[in-house]
Image (cartoon, rainbow, N blue to C red):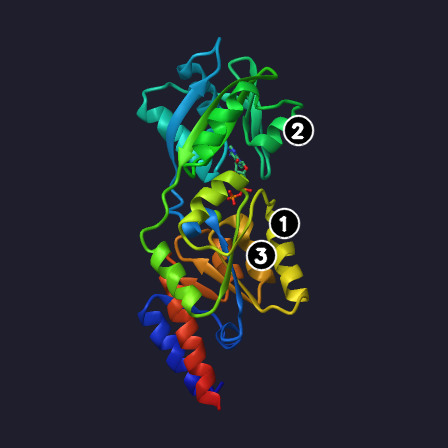
């Protein structure tokens, strides 16, 4: 494309909240056929809220929440913030945690009030040699509503679960419909559970789901699609999306997301919603038409 057509597109994009980092991103995006979208913070608002605390027999709700939130105080994950905020709203006083450890893609561990506490998904349970037991049905029922369930473990025993909900952005359904009409194959990639992912994707017309993925898996999924000859764009917002944004032919960061995601991307959507991708595609196609 000519420098002039790129300047025009960059200016128009900026007016509409689509920041274009370089000419390559603009030129490549016209050829993209596959769009990978992160779930949390990209399709959803990314501000999860605590909606349930379920203790197993022999434990009480207030303790499960207190120990969970005390531990999560040490984590910057959006799920952790939801649990801490939920505890504070319910007037639960937190303790100081020690030996805090984040287990990537699984959860957190540490000591609170003299107890070993762990909190996270089914992978974390497996890592601890535990199974969900009687909580499995309750967990699945919540996941079918699109919630993210975390198990709480005290001293090697499951004490209960906490569940958070993160609503889909108001703009997401319309944007995905438009992106389909533009011809993209849309794949959702998430570190979240398969059932939760299905429930969220269900009404959005997402073509494929890759759930339970570790952060490094997102970049690998993209590499495999590229090896099959696809031109791939990735839309994400999180620190853990940065490698995938860099691997993609075109990385698209939510302006509301992490700085490292924005740095790794060719496009930044200032408003933090997928409508910006529709605009970016039109700008890209218009620029490429001007060359010929
Ligand atoms: P994503 O942002 O796509 O959900 P992550 O790799 O950050 O991917 O998280 C994957 C899963 O690991 C989460 O859905 C959750 O079950 C678990 N997890 C990660 N961090 C935490 C945390 N601080 N507390 C509880 N669970 C966590
Ligand atoms: Mg995210």
Side of 29 where 272 appears, left or right: left
Q: Which residue is mark 2?
A: 127
- Residue drawn at x 63%, y 22% is 130
Give the vertical position of 208 relative to 248 (above or below).
Answer: above
Does residue 99 appear in the picture of this structure? Answer: no
Residue occupying image coordinates x 55% and y 59%: 245
- Whichever of callouts 3 and 1 sits on the residue coming sooner in the sequence is 1
Residue 77 in picture, x, y percent from top left? 48, 38
| Disc 3 C-beta below 8 A from ligand 1 | no
Q: How far apart in space, not on screen, are marks 2 and 1 (Cα)?
A: 19 Å
Q: CA distance from mark 3 to mark 1?
A: 8 Å
Q: Quadrant of residue 53?
A: top left
| Residue to which mark 3 is pinned | 244
Q: Is residue 157 left or right of residue 257?
A: right
Given residues 47 and 151, the one toward you in this image is 151
Q: Is residue 282 left or right of residue 25?
A: left
Q: Which residue is mark 1?
A: 216
Q: CA distance from mark 2 to mark 3?
A: 26 Å
């Amino acid at each position: 494309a000519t420098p002039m057509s790129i300047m025009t597109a960059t200016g128009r994009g900026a007016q509409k909240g689509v920041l274009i980092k370089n000419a390559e991103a603009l030129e490549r995006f016209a050829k993209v056929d596959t769009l990978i979208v992160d779930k949390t913070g990209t399709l959803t608002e990314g501000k999860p809220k605590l909606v349930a605390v379920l203790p197993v027999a022999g434990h009480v709700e207030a303790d499960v929440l207190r120990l969970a939130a005390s531990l999560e105080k040490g984590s910057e994950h959006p799920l952790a913030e939801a649990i801490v905020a939920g505890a504070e709203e319910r007037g639960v006083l937190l303790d100081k945690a020690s030996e805090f450890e984040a287990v990537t893609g699984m959860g957190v561990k540490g000591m609170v009030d003299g107890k070993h506490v762990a909190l996270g998904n089914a992978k974390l349970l497996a890592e601890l040699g535990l199974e969900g037991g009687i909580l499995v049905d309750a967990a699945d029922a919540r996941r079918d509503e699109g919630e993210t369930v975390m198990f709480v473990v005290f001293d090697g025993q499951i004490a209960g679960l906490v569940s958070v909900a993160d609503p889909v952005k108001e703009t997401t359904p319309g944007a995905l419909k438009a992106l389909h009409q533009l011809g993209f194959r849309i794949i959702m990639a998430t570190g979240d559970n398969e059932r939760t992912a299905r429930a969220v994707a269900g009404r959005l017309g997402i073509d494929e789901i890759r759930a339970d993925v570790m952060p490094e898996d997102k970049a690998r999924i993209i590499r495999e699609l590229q090896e099959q000859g696809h031109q791939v764009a990735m839309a994400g917002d999180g620190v853990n999306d940065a490698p995938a944004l860099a691997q993609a032919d075109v990385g698209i960061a939510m302006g509301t997301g992490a700085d490292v995601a924005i740095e790794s991307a060719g496009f930044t959507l200032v408003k933090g919603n997928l409508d910006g991708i529709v605009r970016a595609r039109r700008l890209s196609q218009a620029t490429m038409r001007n060359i010929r």
